[in-house]
Amino acid sequence: MKFVLPLLLLISGFAHAYKPEVGHSKILPLAHKLLQTCNLSAGTFYSKSDIKIMTKASAGMDSGEVDFSPETGKNPFSIWSRIMNWHFYNKDMPSGETFLWLFEKSYKNTWMLLAQGYKQTKNNTHKLTYLGGMAHFIEDMANPAHVIPAFHMIGIKDGIDDFEPDHETLTKRINGQYLCNTLNKATINSDPISIRNWSVEQTYKELEKRIPHCPDLKWGDFYDKAKKGQFFGDFHTNPTRAPSIHNDQKYTSKTFYIGDKGKLVSNTDSNLVCDFKDNDPRYIKFITQLFENAIIADALLLISQQPFLSNKL
Ligand SMILES: [Zn+2]
Protein backbone atom coordinates (compact mmCIF):
# COMPACT_ATOMS: atom_id res chain seq x y z
CA MET A 1 0.00 0.00 0.00
CA LYS A 2 2.97 2.24 0.48
CA PHE A 3 3.02 3.45 -3.08
CA VAL A 4 -0.68 4.08 -3.24
CA LEU A 5 -0.69 7.26 -1.19
CA PRO A 6 1.64 9.23 -3.43
CA LEU A 7 -0.43 7.97 -6.33
CA LEU A 8 -3.60 9.21 -4.71
CA LEU A 9 -2.02 12.59 -4.15
CA LEU A 10 -0.96 12.59 -7.75
CA ILE A 11 -4.41 11.67 -8.90
CA SER A 12 -6.10 14.36 -6.88
CA GLY A 13 -4.20 16.69 -9.15
CA PHE A 14 -6.07 15.31 -12.14
CA ALA A 15 -9.15 16.97 -10.81
CA HIS A 16 -7.59 20.34 -11.37
CA ALA A 17 -5.95 19.47 -14.64
CA TYR A 18 -8.95 20.64 -16.61
CA LYS A 19 -10.00 23.69 -14.60
CA PRO A 20 -13.50 22.98 -13.37
CA GLU A 21 -14.76 26.41 -14.30
CA VAL A 22 -13.73 26.01 -17.91
CA GLY A 23 -13.77 22.26 -18.30
CA HIS A 24 -16.03 19.30 -17.85
CA SER A 25 -18.58 21.00 -15.61
CA LYS A 26 -19.44 23.55 -18.29
CA ILE A 27 -19.64 21.58 -21.49
CA LEU A 28 -22.83 19.52 -21.11
CA PRO A 29 -24.99 22.43 -19.91
CA LEU A 30 -23.80 24.46 -22.90
CA ALA A 31 -24.57 21.54 -25.21
CA HIS A 32 -28.08 21.41 -23.73
CA LYS A 33 -28.47 25.14 -24.33
CA LEU A 34 -27.35 24.66 -27.92
CA LEU A 35 -30.01 21.98 -28.52
CA GLN A 36 -32.63 24.42 -27.27
CA THR A 37 -31.31 27.20 -29.49
CA CYS A 38 -31.56 24.91 -32.49
CA ASN A 39 -35.11 23.89 -31.52
CA LEU A 40 -34.22 20.23 -31.45
CA SER A 41 -36.44 17.86 -29.53
CA ALA A 42 -33.51 16.73 -27.39
CA GLY A 43 -33.42 20.26 -25.98
CA THR A 44 -36.73 19.70 -24.21
CA PHE A 45 -36.46 15.94 -23.83
CA TYR A 46 -33.59 16.20 -21.33
CA SER A 47 -34.53 18.06 -18.19
CA LYS A 48 -32.17 20.35 -16.32
CA SER A 49 -31.79 17.71 -13.65
CA ASP A 50 -30.91 15.06 -16.26
CA ILE A 51 -28.11 17.31 -17.46
CA LYS A 52 -27.05 17.90 -13.88
CA ILE A 53 -26.70 14.17 -13.24
CA MET A 54 -24.67 13.74 -16.42
CA THR A 55 -22.47 16.77 -15.72
CA LYS A 56 -21.69 15.53 -12.24
CA ALA A 57 -20.64 12.21 -13.68
CA SER A 58 -18.53 13.82 -16.38
CA ALA A 59 -16.76 16.23 -14.03
CA GLY A 60 -16.26 13.54 -11.40
CA MET A 61 -14.59 11.12 -13.76
CA ASP A 62 -11.22 12.78 -13.27
CA SER A 63 -11.38 13.00 -9.51
CA GLY A 64 -13.14 9.73 -8.68
CA GLU A 65 -15.65 11.80 -6.72
CA VAL A 66 -18.82 10.33 -8.16
CA ASP A 67 -20.77 8.55 -5.48
CA PHE A 68 -21.92 5.55 -7.43
CA SER A 69 -22.56 1.88 -6.79
CA PRO A 70 -23.13 -0.10 -9.94
CA GLU A 71 -25.75 -2.83 -9.91
CA THR A 72 -23.21 -5.31 -11.21
CA GLY A 73 -19.50 -5.47 -11.89
CA LYS A 74 -16.79 -2.91 -11.31
CA ASN A 75 -17.33 0.76 -10.69
CA PRO A 76 -15.93 2.84 -13.56
CA PHE A 77 -16.19 5.97 -11.39
CA SER A 78 -14.03 4.82 -8.50
CA ILE A 79 -10.79 6.54 -7.66
CA TRP A 80 -9.12 3.17 -8.08
CA SER A 81 -10.40 2.89 -11.61
CA ARG A 82 -9.10 6.41 -12.26
CA ILE A 83 -5.63 5.53 -11.03
CA MET A 84 -5.40 2.37 -13.08
CA ASN A 85 -6.90 3.80 -16.27
CA TRP A 86 -5.61 6.98 -17.86
CA HIS A 87 -7.47 9.15 -20.28
CA PHE A 88 -5.34 9.05 -23.40
CA TYR A 89 -6.19 7.83 -26.87
CA ASN A 90 -4.02 6.74 -29.76
CA LYS A 91 -6.05 5.84 -32.80
CA ASP A 92 -3.31 3.56 -34.14
CA MET A 93 -3.33 1.56 -30.92
CA PRO A 94 -7.00 1.00 -30.19
CA SER A 95 -6.19 -1.83 -27.81
CA GLY A 96 -4.28 0.61 -25.61
CA GLU A 97 -1.04 -0.03 -23.78
CA THR A 98 -0.11 -0.57 -20.18
CA PHE A 99 2.61 1.14 -18.20
CA LEU A 100 4.57 -1.12 -15.82
CA TRP A 101 1.99 -3.80 -16.65
CA LEU A 102 -0.35 -2.02 -14.25
CA PHE A 103 -1.60 1.23 -15.59
CA GLU A 104 -3.67 1.29 -18.73
CA LYS A 105 -2.73 4.42 -20.64
CA SER A 106 -5.99 4.48 -22.57
CA TYR A 107 -9.50 4.56 -21.15
CA LYS A 108 -10.70 1.51 -23.09
CA ASN A 109 -11.53 -0.50 -19.96
CA THR A 110 -13.38 2.36 -18.33
CA TRP A 111 -15.34 3.03 -21.48
CA MET A 112 -16.26 -0.66 -21.71
CA LEU A 113 -17.65 -0.64 -18.18
CA LEU A 114 -19.59 2.55 -18.87
CA ALA A 115 -21.04 1.20 -22.10
CA GLN A 116 -22.00 -2.11 -20.50
CA GLY A 117 -23.58 -0.49 -17.48
CA TYR A 118 -25.43 1.95 -19.71
CA LYS A 119 -26.91 -0.84 -21.78
CA GLN A 120 -27.87 -3.06 -18.89
CA THR A 121 -29.31 -0.75 -16.27
CA LYS A 122 -32.99 0.01 -16.07
CA ASN A 123 -32.43 2.75 -13.53
CA ASN A 124 -32.72 6.14 -15.20
CA THR A 125 -30.29 7.96 -12.91
CA HIS A 126 -27.74 5.23 -13.47
CA LYS A 127 -28.26 5.43 -17.22
CA LEU A 128 -27.62 9.16 -17.22
CA THR A 129 -24.59 8.70 -14.97
CA TYR A 130 -23.01 6.18 -17.32
CA LEU A 131 -23.76 8.46 -20.23
CA GLY A 132 -22.13 11.38 -18.40
CA GLY A 133 -19.05 9.22 -17.91
CA MET A 134 -18.86 8.65 -21.65
CA ALA A 135 -19.36 12.38 -22.22
CA HIS A 136 -16.21 12.96 -20.16
CA PHE A 137 -14.08 11.03 -22.63
CA ILE A 138 -15.81 12.61 -25.61
CA GLU A 139 -14.90 15.98 -24.07
CA ASP A 140 -11.33 14.90 -23.35
CA MET A 141 -10.91 14.05 -27.03
CA ALA A 142 -11.31 17.73 -27.89
CA ASN A 143 -7.95 18.39 -26.24
CA PRO A 144 -5.06 17.54 -28.61
CA ALA A 145 -2.86 16.36 -25.74
CA HIS A 146 -5.32 13.48 -25.22
CA VAL A 147 -5.36 12.35 -28.84
CA ILE A 148 -1.75 12.83 -29.93
CA PRO A 149 -1.46 11.68 -27.14
CA ALA A 150 1.11 13.63 -25.13
CA PHE A 151 1.54 12.56 -21.54
CA HIS A 152 0.48 15.14 -18.97
CA MET A 153 -0.88 15.28 -15.45
CA ILE A 154 -0.24 17.29 -12.34
CA GLY A 155 3.07 19.08 -12.67
CA ILE A 156 3.20 18.27 -16.36
CA LYS A 157 1.19 20.85 -18.18
CA ASP A 158 -0.69 20.36 -21.40
CA GLY A 159 -0.64 23.99 -22.46
CA ILE A 160 -4.38 24.17 -22.75
CA ASP A 161 -5.34 23.90 -19.09
CA ASP A 162 -4.13 27.42 -18.45
CA PHE A 163 -6.72 28.90 -20.73
CA GLU A 164 -10.25 30.06 -20.43
CA PRO A 165 -12.01 29.99 -23.76
CA ASP A 166 -13.52 33.22 -24.98
CA HIS A 167 -16.88 32.95 -23.23
CA GLU A 168 -18.38 35.93 -24.98
CA THR A 169 -17.79 34.41 -28.41
CA LEU A 170 -19.00 31.01 -27.28
CA THR A 171 -22.21 32.37 -25.76
CA LYS A 172 -22.87 34.35 -28.90
CA ARG A 173 -22.41 31.31 -31.08
CA ILE A 174 -24.50 29.05 -28.86
CA ASN A 175 -27.34 31.52 -28.59
CA GLY A 176 -27.24 32.35 -32.29
CA GLN A 177 -27.96 29.88 -35.07
CA TYR A 178 -24.27 29.55 -35.94
CA LEU A 179 -23.81 25.95 -34.82
CA CYS A 180 -27.18 24.45 -35.76
CA ASN A 181 -25.99 23.63 -39.27
CA THR A 182 -23.02 21.71 -37.94
CA LEU A 183 -25.33 19.75 -35.67
CA ASN A 184 -27.66 18.88 -38.51
CA LYS A 185 -24.86 17.97 -40.90
CA ALA A 186 -22.92 15.58 -38.67
CA THR A 187 -23.55 11.96 -39.50
CA ILE A 188 -23.65 9.93 -36.35
CA ASN A 189 -25.02 6.60 -35.38
CA SER A 190 -26.56 5.38 -32.18
CA ASP A 191 -23.37 4.05 -30.58
CA PRO A 192 -21.72 6.66 -28.34
CA ILE A 193 -18.35 5.47 -29.63
CA SER A 194 -19.22 7.06 -32.98
CA ILE A 195 -19.48 10.44 -31.22
CA ARG A 196 -16.14 9.74 -29.54
CA ASN A 197 -14.69 9.13 -33.00
CA TRP A 198 -16.28 12.29 -34.32
CA SER A 199 -14.66 14.28 -31.52
CA VAL A 200 -11.24 12.76 -32.22
CA GLU A 201 -11.51 13.49 -35.95
CA GLN A 202 -12.55 17.06 -35.23
CA THR A 203 -9.44 17.62 -33.14
CA TYR A 204 -7.21 16.14 -35.84
CA LYS A 205 -8.82 18.54 -38.31
CA GLU A 206 -8.05 21.51 -36.05
CA LEU A 207 -4.43 20.38 -35.85
CA GLU A 208 -4.23 20.37 -39.65
CA LYS A 209 -5.26 24.02 -39.81
CA ARG A 210 -2.65 26.67 -40.53
CA ILE A 211 -1.65 29.05 -37.77
CA PRO A 212 -2.83 32.58 -38.71
CA HIS A 213 0.05 34.88 -39.73
CA CYS A 214 2.34 31.83 -39.84
CA PRO A 215 0.75 29.92 -42.71
CA ASP A 216 3.69 27.56 -43.11
CA LEU A 217 3.04 26.11 -39.68
CA LYS A 218 -0.04 24.32 -38.50
CA TRP A 219 -1.39 23.84 -35.00
CA GLY A 220 -0.26 20.24 -35.13
CA ASP A 221 3.31 21.55 -35.07
CA PHE A 222 2.84 22.07 -31.34
CA TYR A 223 3.01 18.30 -30.97
CA ASP A 224 5.29 15.52 -32.08
CA LYS A 225 3.33 12.52 -33.26
CA ALA A 226 3.81 9.12 -31.66
CA LYS A 227 6.39 7.00 -33.42
CA LYS A 228 5.14 3.80 -35.00
CA GLY A 229 4.44 1.21 -32.36
CA GLN A 230 4.59 3.73 -29.51
CA PHE A 231 1.58 4.89 -27.61
CA PHE A 232 2.70 8.38 -26.64
CA GLY A 233 3.75 11.22 -28.86
CA ASP A 234 4.89 14.39 -27.16
CA PHE A 235 4.64 18.12 -26.87
CA HIS A 236 6.70 19.81 -29.52
CA THR A 237 10.40 20.18 -28.99
CA ASN A 238 12.09 22.99 -30.84
CA PRO A 239 15.04 21.63 -32.80
CA THR A 240 17.02 24.70 -31.79
CA ARG A 241 17.16 26.05 -28.29
CA ALA A 242 14.80 28.96 -28.67
CA PRO A 243 13.70 30.08 -25.21
CA SER A 244 10.04 30.05 -24.37
CA ILE A 245 8.22 31.86 -21.62
CA HIS A 246 5.28 30.33 -19.84
CA ASN A 247 3.40 32.08 -17.05
CA ASP A 248 6.25 34.58 -16.83
CA GLN A 249 8.71 31.81 -16.15
CA LYS A 250 11.46 31.36 -18.60
CA TYR A 251 11.89 27.77 -19.59
CA THR A 252 15.25 26.50 -20.57
CA SER A 253 13.70 23.35 -21.94
CA LYS A 254 13.14 23.20 -25.64
CA THR A 255 9.56 22.13 -25.26
CA PHE A 256 7.18 24.68 -26.67
CA TYR A 257 3.59 24.50 -25.44
CA ILE A 258 0.41 26.12 -26.64
CA GLY A 259 0.22 29.29 -24.57
CA ASP A 260 3.94 29.90 -24.50
CA LYS A 261 5.51 33.12 -25.60
CA GLY A 262 8.46 32.88 -27.93
CA LYS A 263 9.38 31.06 -31.09
CA LEU A 264 7.84 27.86 -32.30
CA VAL A 265 10.40 26.22 -34.57
CA SER A 266 9.35 23.53 -37.02
CA ASN A 267 10.85 20.07 -36.65
CA THR A 268 11.05 19.52 -40.36
CA ASP A 269 12.62 22.86 -41.29
CA SER A 270 14.27 25.04 -38.66
CA ASN A 271 13.79 28.06 -40.93
CA LEU A 272 10.09 27.81 -40.28
CA VAL A 273 9.49 29.88 -37.19
CA CYS A 274 6.37 31.35 -35.68
CA ASP A 275 6.55 34.14 -33.13
CA PHE A 276 4.02 34.14 -30.33
CA LYS A 277 3.58 37.07 -28.05
CA ASP A 278 2.29 37.18 -24.49
CA ASN A 279 -1.43 36.29 -24.32
CA ASP A 280 -1.42 35.80 -28.04
CA PRO A 281 -5.02 36.08 -29.27
CA ARG A 282 -4.42 33.20 -31.68
CA TYR A 283 -4.22 30.84 -28.73
CA ILE A 284 -7.56 31.93 -27.32
CA LYS A 285 -9.18 31.53 -30.72
CA PHE A 286 -7.80 28.04 -31.13
CA ILE A 287 -8.80 26.92 -27.66
CA THR A 288 -12.27 28.42 -28.01
CA GLN A 289 -12.67 26.35 -31.17
CA LEU A 290 -11.65 23.16 -29.36
CA PHE A 291 -14.09 23.95 -26.59
CA GLU A 292 -16.84 24.58 -29.11
CA ASN A 293 -16.14 21.21 -30.71
CA ALA A 294 -16.56 19.54 -27.33
CA ILE A 295 -19.93 21.26 -26.88
CA ILE A 296 -21.10 20.12 -30.30
CA ALA A 297 -19.92 16.57 -29.59
CA ASP A 298 -21.90 16.48 -26.34
CA ALA A 299 -24.95 17.83 -28.15
CA LEU A 300 -24.60 15.02 -30.69
CA LEU A 301 -24.34 12.52 -27.87
CA LEU A 302 -27.55 13.82 -26.32
CA ILE A 303 -29.38 13.69 -29.67
CA SER A 304 -28.16 10.20 -30.49
CA GLN A 305 -29.15 8.71 -27.13
CA GLN A 306 -32.62 10.23 -26.92
CA PRO A 307 -34.28 7.10 -28.39
CA PHE A 308 -32.68 4.89 -25.77
CA LEU A 309 -33.94 6.98 -22.90
CA SER A 310 -37.43 7.41 -24.25
CA ASN A 311 -39.03 5.13 -21.67
CA LYS A 312 -37.69 7.12 -18.78
CA LEU A 313 -40.77 9.17 -17.94
ZN1 LIG B 1 -10.13 12.96 -18.39
Image (cartoon, rainbow, N blue to C red):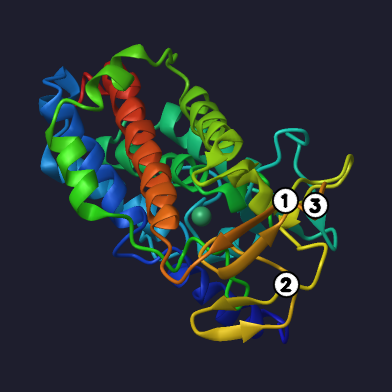
Image mark for residue 200 = none
Mark 3 neighbour class, 10 Å CA radius: few under 14, some 14 to 19, many 20 or more: some
Q: Is residue 271 left or right of residue 190?
A: right
Near-viewer residue (8 or 277): 277
Q: Is residue 139 left or right of residue 303?
A: right
Q: Is residue 207 left or right of residue 252?
A: left
Residue at (42, 16) in percent of width and height: 190
Q: Amino acid at mark 3?
A: Asn
Residue designated by label 1: 272
Give x and y (percent) for residue 18.
Answer: 44, 63
Is any atom of residue 152 visible in this view? no
Residue at (56, 86) in percent of width and height: 249
Cα separation, mark 3 vs mark 1, equals 9 Å
Cα separation, mark 2 vs mark 3, equals 13 Å
Residue designated by label 2: 242
Where 237 falls versus 196 (above or below)?
Answer: below
Give x and y (percent) for residue 156.
Answer: 63, 73
Q: Amino acid at mark 1?
A: Leu
Where 126 falls versus 251 (above or below)?
Answer: above
Is any atom of residue 86 visible in this view? yes
Secondary element under disc 3, as helix, strand or loop, is loop
Mark 1 neighbour class, 10 Å CA radius: few under 14, some 14 to 19, many 20 or more: some
Residue at (51, 75) in percent of width and height: 13
Secondary element under disc 1, as helix, strand or loop, is loop
Where 79 falls versus 266 (above or below)?
Answer: below
Residue designated by label 3: 267
The residue at the far right in this view is: 229
